[in-house]
Amino acid sequence: MARRQVLITGAGSGLGRALALRYAAAGAAVACADRRFERAEETAALLPGEGHLALVADVGDDASMRALHDTLMRRWQRLDVLVNNAGIASGGCLVDSTIEEWREVLEINLLGVVRGCRWFLPDMLARGRGQIVNIASFAALAGAPGIMSYGVAKAGVVTLSEQLRAEVAAQGVTVSVACPAFFRTNLLENWRGDPRVRETAERMMARAPDRLDEVADRLFAAAERGEFLILPTRRETLRWRIKRWLPGWYFRRMLAATRR
């Protein structure tokens, strides 16, 4: 069988890099795309095996994503797995956020995923096979205060994934969406919004029970199994079930926790 070819956006650090290492260890050729080319190069150099690529791409820019598609198709002629991972962090209440923040967060965190799917899905459909893994966040499901633009953008990624899954179900393409909660990574480097919320997020990341490698292991294994909704941090499966089964109790507990 032909060697799998995988594209990961935001592969220059954090979860993107960790996933690149796992796909490469499983025998895939990995295209590492990042806004900072030097970071993409660093990741590609760490990967076992040969044939990996380092590419520059800004998921928030139409022309950049079109160029990424054209370059990759010229080099590889096909893509088997697309991991839409790139994103930025933001936080704050609705009345404190700016329209500029909303535009930037939606442009990158939601429309960046749309661009990835829009450019690489047609080839998968034409071949009758492929996989798309969209990285969202438990913020998309939690309904928590203080993460307005980020939570809305990531909720859009979940809904996009649900609808896309239904659209391509009979055409050989599988879709997954991952919703991790806090774990230690460098996501806050690209923070937008209220600095006080950033401080809270930093403390929660420092106290989180999950580590990057654990999250990447669970996410990769679930994606390989073809699971749709992936909750790779250890507490979130129960929290998601409680919210679905006991929404009123969940809401009261969530408010009490956020007040603390």
Image (cartoon, rainbow, N blue to C red):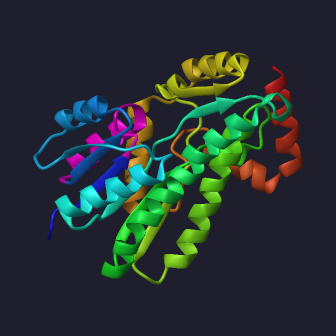
Residue 45 position in % (x across, y down) = 17, 34
Snapshot quadrant of residue 255: top right
Relative height, residue 253 to residue 126 (above, below)? above
Residue 41 position in % (x across, y down) = 23, 34
Res 239 seen here: no
In screen coordinates, is 20 left or right of 168?
left
Stretch in magenta: 9-27
Q: Residue furthest left?
A: 50
Viewer-side residue, 244 vs 65: 65
In screen coordinates, is 193 left or right of 208?
right
The N terminus - image quarter = bottom left
Residue 153 position in % (x across, y down) = 65, 47
Q: Residue at x 80, y 27 (%)?
A: 258
Residue 225 position in % (x across, y down) = 39, 62
Q: Residue at x 40, y 40 (%)?
A: 10
> Magenta segment: does it hold 183?
no
Viewer-side residue, 67 vs 168: 67
Q: Residue furthest bottom?
A: 170
Q: Residue at x 38, y 49 (%)?
A: 220
In screen coordinates, is 164 left or right of 37?
right
The C terminus - image quarter = top right
